[in-house]
Amino acid sequence: MKKYEFTGESKTVNGVTVKRIRAIKEFGSTKSGSLGGWIESERNLSQEDNCWVADNACAYGNAIIRDNARLYENAIVHGNAVLSDGAVVTDKAEVYGNAHVGELARIDGVAKIFGNAYIVGSAHIGDNAHVGGNAIIGGKAIIEGTARVYGHTKVSGDTLLVSGNYQGCDEIDEIDDIDEYLDECYLDECDLGECF
């Protein structure tokens, strides 16, 4: 049985027509009759599990939201991006390209996740941070501020914070590594030629 339907209301976002949804049964914390956000077609939001697009959030293109993932406020997911498991994307964050956000990861602020980035664990990407390329962010890593993480970077561990003007493309998996690395690799000093 379907869990949502289209309301008949539509709008254009970045040249794509998206349609508002409404829950037609109760699931998770969503009540029957609740207005949802905007999707281009049913391929964007699974009719199964507790995933949901709410508020003014929008999903289009070949983007897929499944499992118990949530898209809130003014967040946008498009391209071939996937939100899965219990991932949350909110505020004005954007996930696109072939990026995958899963497990209990949270993306908020005006953060951008793109390329083939893979965000998992209970990682938090916020503020104006950008994560792209083939970066993998996991564990309890926190990427915030104006941090830019690209290339084949891997950030994981229990409590890692990458913030400020960090721009890097290395593997960081221990807090000692981050402190040392950030001292050496700020935006105006880091040679990113090997990252791209």
Image (tube, helix red, strand yellow):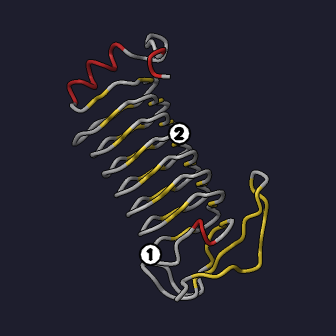
Q: Earlier in the sequence, mark 2 or mark 1?
A: 1
Q: Residue at x 45, y 64 (%)?
A: 69
Relative image position of residue 100 (x, y in whole percent): 46, 50
Q: Are marks 2 and 1 in contact (CB under 8 Å)?
A: no
Q: Secondary structure at mark 2?
A: loop
Looking at the rendered structure, the number of numbered marks drawn on it comes to 2
Relative image position of residue 179 (x, y in whole percent): 27, 23
Q: Residue at x 44, y 35 (%)?
A: 134
Disc 1 residue type (three-letter):
Asn
Relative image position of residue 184 (x, y in whole percent): 34, 13
| Residue that label 2 marks | 115
| Residue that label 1 marks | 50
Disc 2 residue type (three-letter):
Gly
- Circle 1 packing at 10 Å, graded few (<14), some (14-19), many (20+), is some
Locate residue 141 relative to residue 29 in the image: left or right. left
92 lies above or below 130 = below
Relative image position of residue 14 (x, y in whole percent): 75, 51
44 lies above or below 142 = below
Determine the image quadrant of residue 16: bottom right
User: Residue 19 shows which numbered tag?
Assistant: none
Instruction: From the image, state whether disc 2 or disc 1 is nearer to you.
Output: 2
Q: Secondary structure at mark 1?
A: loop
Task: Find the distance from the CA under tag 2 to the CA under tag 1.
Answer: 26 Å
Q: Residue at x 45, y 59 (%)?
A: 88
74 lies above or below 112 = below
Q: Residue at x 44, y 52 (%)?
A: 101
- Circle 2 packing at 10 Å, graded few (<14), some (14-19), many (20+), is many
